[in-house]
Image: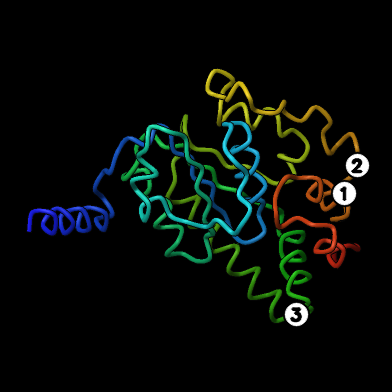
Amino acid sequence: MARLAALLVTTAWARSPLEMLCDGDRLIVVAGYHHSGTSILQAQLARRLGLPVPTTTDERWPTDHHEEACSPEWSVFRTRLSGLRDVHRFARLRNRFPAARLVFCTRDAPNQIWSLMRRACAESPRLATYLAKQRCQVLEKEARWRRPGARDWTVDLADFAVDSRSILQQVVPGHLASPDAPSLFIESAAVRVPSFNNNDGLRRWQVRQPVYAYERSRFAREGGALV
């Protein structure tokens, strides 16, 4: 009975959107709309902390795994923000984990919508309009809910490609990085690719990243100029 009572209390506690679960000092949450670079950033942060790079789709809310999120060891969660409800839930993570590091990923609209449509092998104008509206709703809602602070970052995928070093150092300073972590990128995408006027340069940078989903075969169909 005691164990059952404790379980019921824990469940009710986890469901309260305003109840603090722990300070979350060792928790990083990466979130964003679809195809905004969350997988890449999660993988790079995991490497910097000496954690294994996810080899399967790893989209979870820390509130659903609060024992891991409140662990004394580092954890890097990633979740998609598919709509307004997800953005609201993401904003409330600050109540649940006051000291957590929250990273919101963005990407320029033409590149992001093109990526979504090409990955889905679809070219419907109606789909493009729907995706554009949904993306704008997510970004506008996120901007209203969050307050930029020492542990809140908004990271644009193109900026991260050009200068991943400084962004990784902001989220995980050198004194917190694992001594076994690989060195940060020295060669930026800007050096390899003079311009991001089309999505080819960004795609070539993505395919070099240590993430399971970014394989040459999958990105081959995303080539070509933006429309």
Residue at which label 1 appears? 201
> Looking at the image, is 188 positioned above or below residue 31?
above
Q: Residue furthest top?
A: 175
Of pointers 1 and 3, the one earlier in the residue sequence:
3
What distance separates the C-alpha of mark 1 from that of mark 3? 25 Å
Query: Mark 2 highlights which residue?
Result: 193
- Indicate the position of residue 80 as horizontal and vertical percent values: 54, 59
Residue in view at x 88 percent, y 51 percent: 197
Q: State how the image is colored.
A: rainbow
Contact between labelled residues 2 and 1, with CB atoms less than 8 Å apart: yes
- Front residue of 155 and 148: 155
Q: Circle 3 is placed at which residue position?
A: 125
Amino acid type, callout 2: Val
Q: Amino acid at mark 1?
A: Gly
Q: Quadrant of the C terminus?
A: bottom right
Q: Residue sitting at 62 percent across and 61 percent down?
A: 34
**The N terminus, quarter of image:** bottom left
Q: How many marks?
A: 3
Q: x, y percentage for residue 208? A: 81, 45
Q: Nearer the viewer, mark 2 or mark 3?
A: 2
Instruction: Identify the secondary structure beneath mark 1.
Output: helix
Rendered residue at 92%/40% (across/down): 194
Viewer-nearest of discs 1 and 3: 1
- Residue 205, percent across and down? 82, 46
Vertically, is 161 above or below 140? above
Q: Is residue 80 left or right of residue 88?
A: right
C-alpha distance separating marks 2 and 3: 30 Å
Gap between marks 1 and 2 measured at Cα? 6 Å
Residue contact between numbered discs 1 and 3, judged by CB atoms under 8 Å:
no
Q: Is residue 98 left or right of residue 102?
A: left
Q: Residues within 10 Å of mark 2 (few under 14, many from 20)?
A: some
* Callout 3 amino acid: Pro
